[in-house]
Amino acid sequence: MTGILLLAHGSREGDTEKTMRRITEYVKAKLRNVMVEEAYLQFRDKNLEKGLMSLVERGADEIKVIPYFLFEGVHIKEDIPAEIREFNKLYPAVKIIMGSTLGADKRLADIVVDRIKEIL
């Protein structure tokens, strides 16, 4: 069974989780009958390992980690893959694949334009 883990950077700010839960709910509504969880790389209790474990406990044997990050920095290139490798040492039967960041997607430009129009 496939699970999706939306992984945000995380923040000490409490509203981070509220925002990420809303995004997760939006994704769940579009991907009905798919297990979707959120987790955070830093600063929040539900870290990457706990997010992966939650999906495994729900029956996932294949997990797609989708970074809710704009850019491909050190976290994307090094930190997250290293944590996934460590998790796989404990759960070698679980296939984990990391997707791309949000990056330079034209759809994001529409959101930026909306934000600009809000303050004009």
Image (cartoon, rainbow, N blue to C red):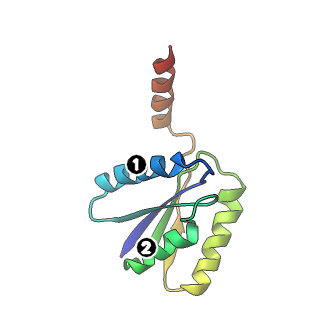
Amino acid marked by disc 2: Leu
Return the residue nearer the eye: 112 or 21.
Answer: 21
Residue matched to label 2: 55
- Image position of 23 with respect to 48: above or below: above
Residue 69 placed where, x, y %? 58, 49
Residue found at x 56% / y 40%: 104
Where is residue 25 shown, x and y percent of the image? Answer: 36, 53
The local secondary structure at tag 2 comes to helix
Residue 31 in the image, given as x and y percentages of width and height: 31, 57
Residue at coordinates 57% horizontally, 67% vertically from top-left? 48
Please identify the quarter of the rendering in which residue 1 is found: bottom left
Residue located farthest toward the top when viewing the structure as drawn: 120
Disc with the residue nearer the chain's start (2 vs 1): 1
Q: Amino acid at mark 1?
A: Arg
Tell me if 31 is positioned left or right of 113 in this view: left
Q: Mark 1: which secondary structure?
A: helix
Q: What label does residue 114 carry, if any?
A: none
Task: Give the x, y percent position of residue 15.
Answer: 52, 46
Q: Which residue is mark 1?
A: 22
Q: Quadrant of residue 47?
A: bottom right
Q: Is residue 66 left or right of residue 29?
A: right
